[in-house]
Image: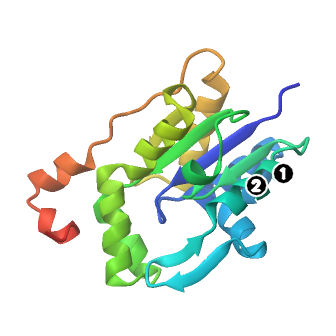
Amino acid sequence: MKKLRLVITGNPGVGKHTSANIIAEKINAEIIDINDVAIDNNATGKNTDLGFDVNVKKLLRLLEKLLKTKRDLVLVGHLAPYVLKPAGISLVAVLRRSPYELEKTLKKRGYSVDKVRENVASEILGISLHDSVKTFGKRKVAEFDTTGKTPKETADEILAALQNKQKSKPKLMGIDWLNLVSEKGDMRRFFKY
């Protein structure tokens, strides 16, 4: 039987870890937190205002070893498109959240002004989605809008997509935060220019 390799990625604050925990429990899978693997195995460099530098090559090698396990896995982290290869990955769930809701979440977490701006701008531009499609291909990537949803609702949507994957390819929803922010006249709020 083929091993399940579900990747959950997206910007910080979109609900990746909470949804991953719910899914892993429901399907009896092991969770691999990509950030923890990097930190626990000294695959990080110095800590900057925007976070840790990561040794991508070292982290890729570490994750390749972990992927050889016989257990079903849920791999979670915003670094997924940069440190995983597409071979063997069942589905990549890219979680998205309204920039307005995301801004509140990151501020509550105590992120610096620059880190909030960087992450919200990344969400508006769809960087995680773009990089996931570039790495894993459209056939393996589906995006999920977590705005106003509970982690359980998001987890249920991901599980439904995972079960339907054999019948049809995952879908890209075309979430367009840039248009939303532009229409509201909030470009300067989220972007320095």
Q: In the image, is 160 to the left or to the right of 66?
A: left
Q: Which dot marks residue 61? A: 2
Secondary element under disc 1, as helix, strand or loop, is helix
Which residue is identified by label 1? 65
Q: In the image, is 102 to the left or to the right of 133?
A: left
Q: Residue furthest right?
A: 70
Q: Residue at x 52, y 31 (%)?
A: 137
Q: Residue at x 39, y 54 (%)?
A: 97
Whole-percent x, y for residue 130 in the image:
41, 43
Q: In the image, is 62 to the left or to the right of 35?
A: right
CA neighbours of label 1 inside 10 A, class few (<14), some (14 to 19), many (20+): few
- Check contact, mark 2 vs mark 1: CB within 8 A: yes
Residue type at mark 1 is Lys
The quarter of the displayed image where residue 106 is located = bottom left
Q: Residue at x 26, y 49 (%)?
A: 177
Whole-percent x, y for residue 144 in the image:
46, 42
Q: Residue at x 70, y 68 (%)?
A: 38
Residue 137, above or below 189:
above
Q: Which dot marks residue 182? A: none
